[in-house]
Image (tube, rainbow, N blue to C red):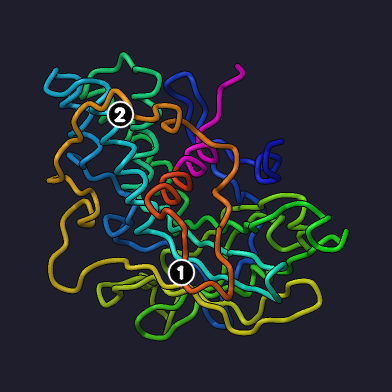
Amino acid sequence: MASRSSVLNRCLIYSCLGVTIFLTGCGTGSGNTAAGLSACTSSTPEANPYTFRSQSGAVQLYTNYKNGWITLDNARQAAFSQLGRNTEHWSDYVDIAIDDAQMIRVTVTYIDPVLIQYIVLNHALFFQSSMDAPTFDGELKFILDKLAKRNELLFVVTITAPLYKEQAYNSNVLTVRLPIKQMALINAGDLRAYPTHDDHILDENIPITHGPVSGIVGYPLSVLYQDNCIWFMDQWNTTLTLDIPLVTLGATQFTSQFWSIPYRPMIIQDDAHLITFINDPVPAFDPNYDWGRISRSEKPPQPLWIPNADVDSTDWKTYWEDMGRYLWYLFITESHH
């Protein structure tokens, strides 16, 4: 059974490669991002993080494959590895537990433009796209230009649990309450912005025993502050910090949860945010590779976290690759036209 995120309201972004790319989270926003902070459109659009930067690692990897410098299998392995590593870098999570049997993981992933490019690259290689490298480069530009026009920083919030059976919770439905409209994005000047858009499922009493839940949350790129339209994440920001005043699990309230995601280095930054891992060696062809994992997944990975365990047995490389597979599923779906 597909996760509940598959039935969320969706907003069309782009159709290519025989698929349709969607973004969730197209409900109406509140208008104001916080008291005294309203979204605005900056006069310097080139600072938008979704403005396309050519020659990313994804483009170069596709070019190497099309020029015959690496095999399709090598390209697929490399692209999938990059998807997992980017997903891990642009994510943070909070584990919340009442006891050993009642626990959840709330993961927040920033939808960085490089992460989007690796999702599209994996899909293109999966279907052995006939596009040449310049056309692929143009397709990525088109997609990212669409995202740039939203004038938002985009995040995916995913809520998972080790078990989804009601029997595990004494035949009760374990609910989660995440007041998503109160999840603040905080900049280096200690200004707080609140979502301009969010998937409404995140603002409900979520019956986590029925399965994982995820949705898109959008924050303003620029806000009105002291009569000026300023970029919210300016050059002083090195971390994406989000917090929420409380999370309710069952009848128990947990206060002041926060997530911290590295955003940019203070001194050196290239067009790919230093996260393309472009100089990593391309993995050699492995005939025993589990090729079935290089595909979309309808469900996010389940946490193996146990509160009282001395050692976390989670295979983190596989975990973040599986989370990348889930993001791939969220953002790209088959076209039925």
Q: Nearer the viewer, residue 45 or 233?
A: 233
- Is the residue 292 above or below the residue 223 in the image? above
Q: Magenta region: which residues? A: 325-337
* 84 inside magenta stretch: no
Q: Tell me the CA gap for discs 2 and 1.
A: 32 Å
In the picture, residue 54 is in which quadrant? Answer: top left
Q: Quadrant of the N terminus?
A: top right
Label 1 SS:
loop
Residue under circle 1? 311
Q: Which amino acid is tagged 1?
A: Val
Residue under circle 2? 76
| Residue 268 % position (x, y) | 13, 66
| Residue 139 % position (x, y) | 33, 29
Report the residue that reaches farthest toward the front.
Answer: 310
| Numbered label tally | 2
At x 72%, y 67%, the residue is 101
Left or right: 86 as drawn, with respect to 242? left
In the picture, residue 43 is in which quadrant? Answer: bottom left
